Image (cartoon, rainbow, N blue to C red):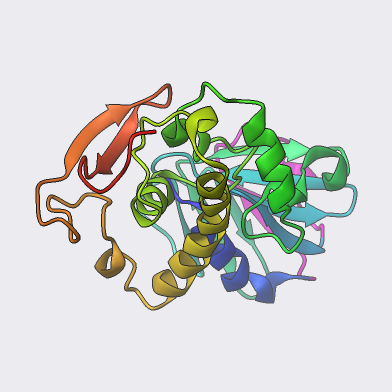
Amino acid sequence: MPEGPSIVILKEEVRSFTGKKVIDVAGYAKIDLERLRNKKIIAFKSWGKHFLICFPGFTVRIHLLMFGTYRINERKDSNPALQLQFAQGELNFYTCSVRIIEEPLDEVYDWSGDVMNEHWNPAGAMAKLKKIPETLVADALLDQDIFAGSGNIIKNEVLFRIRVHPASKVGDLPLKKKRELVKEAVNYSFDFLAWKKEYMLKAHWLAHTKKICPRCHIPFIKEHMGKTNRRTFYCANCQILY
């Protein structure tokens, strides 16, 4: 599943289509496709893992789910969920969820909860964490109401960075560790963004999908953990279970 930094990259890659008119539209998405025809795109935005195409009076929200992809000015062999054609160029989205948002985006999204948004509010994240003391940190980092944009890679790498065992409960973490959790969720997201742009993201993974802890030189443990049941990689020696 593409995480927040990948959606930010998508937003940057399509910036040139801002202000352009959709001259043709196609796809199997269950929305009123004709509503997009001959409409100008006024902005591209992102919130966490949501990619937002803003038109006058409404927004198309795209979620790439687990296996979604996109192509800019080229096509895959498979049918797109949504295809937008312009006088020069096109956008194609595959294997994704597409829906229309009628409300103003400020009424739908809490921008302060997006780890990569300029309005990110760490104090707000701390307050939300305080309300879920029994939640595993492995689940908390995947909670889009707290850390919008954070995904499984970010979860595994952040917990390794701050030396916290993923099965620790939020309420058991010392205040210092909670602050580190919030801080590093943002720091790693921006590192992720920079490395992804350099096509070097995987080269910088220290824990995610790895077999040996680079600090302790012992095998990592791999588990499907928590309510989210996502793959979790951790070192039982240097990541403390609080």
Front residue of 4/181: it is 181
Instruction: In the displayed orientation, state which residue is furthest to the left.
Output: 218
Left or right, residue 89 beside residue 206:
right
Left or right, residue 203 beside residue 30:
left
**Magenta stretch contains residue 79:** no
Front residue of 149/170: it is 170
The residue located at (10%, 46%) in the rendering is: 219
* Residue 89 in the image: above or below residue 181: below
Which region is colored magenta?
19-39
**Magenta stretch contains residue 30:** yes
Left or right, residue 122 beside residue 10:
right
* Residue 163 in the image: above or below residue 203: above
* Residue 73 in the image: above or below residue 35: below
Tell me where residue 223 appears, x and y as whole percent.
23, 31
Quadrant of image for the N terminus = top left
Tell me if residue 87 can be seen: no
Front residue of 13/41: it is 13
Tell me if residue 99 can be seen: yes
Tell me where residue 113 appears, x and y as whole percent.
69, 46
Front residue of 64/170: it is 170
Quadrant of image for the C terminus = top left
The residue located at (57%, 57%) in the rendering is: 183
